[in-house]
Amino acid sequence: MNGAPSPPEPLRLLRSLSAAFAQGSAGLPVQAQPAPIETLIAFQLAGTRVLIDLAWLAEILPLVPLTRVPQVQPWMRGIANVRGKLLPVADGAQFLGRAQSPSKQQRILVIFSEEFSAGLIVDRVEGLRRFPHDAYVAPEELAESPLRGYAVGGLCDPGQGVVPLFQPALLFRDPLFRDVALRDPAPT
């Protein structure tokens, strides 16, 4: 006998079937992978269309009765009792220096981060929007607006242009937002 012994018949059959399958599958077309889609909430704030990732949003409330807190900035509208939990509520447009007239369309976005949560009064909520990941635009490409400092970029929305992507963590880090107490003017 010369060389190695030949494999048993079933193993030889499996090898030939495996080779035939491999050869036949090499010509199959690769299926196109769908572009990843991001679902966001669109809303209006200070007359500007804005998007927020659902991960930052606890809920959307109608305007609820607020308890006014003395000696706070005018944009801090008060405290809401939401199912037994106290929630500070800020007027987003007024905080940005763009006072808006109250309307029935205004809503409170309950936004949160790991360390902080607040209600943010917005002009209106437009609803869910879906965007492909490749619609993202870097923060440097956003138009100048009071919201720019609180956006992590934007998304290109056909017919709407670039819409800022609001990130509550940036708002919560802003010392102007965190320090709501009124200060006595410095004596002259």
Image: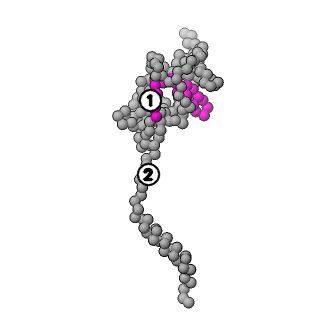
Q: Residue at x 62, y 25 (%)?
A: 83
| Res 136 label | none
Q: Which residue is mark 2?
A: 33
Residue 81's image quarter? Answer: top right
Residue 79 visible somewhere in the drawing: yes
The answer to which of marks 1 and 2 sits earlier in the sequence is: 2
| Res 126 label | 1
Question: Of residues 129 and 186, which is closer to you in this image?
Answer: 129
Q: Residue at x 40, y 59 (%)?
A: 29
Above or below for 142 versus 13? above
Spot occupied by residue 56 in the image (x, y as percentages of width and height): 54, 34
Spot occupied by residue 157 in the image (x, y as percentages of width and height): 39, 36
Local crowd at mark 2 within 10 Å, few (<14), some, or many (≥20)? few
Local crowd at mark 1 within 10 Å, few (<14), some, or many (≥20)? some
Residue 82's image quarter? Answer: top right
Can residue 57 be found in the magenta stretch? no
Q: Residue at x 59, y 21 (%)?
A: 80
Amino acid carrying label 1: it is: Glu
> Marks 2 and 1: in contact by CB < 8 Å?
no
Can residue 112 be found in the magenta stretch? yes
Direction left: furthest residue:
159
Above or below for 161 versus 33? above
Span colored in magenta: 108-128
Secondary structure of the residue carrying tag 2 is loop
Secondary structure of the residue carrying tag 1 is strand
Amino acid carrying label 2: it is: Gln
For the N terminus, give its image quadrant: bottom right
Spot occupied by residue 147 in the image (x, y as percentages of width and height): 46, 28
Q: Residue at x 62, y 23 (%)?
A: 86
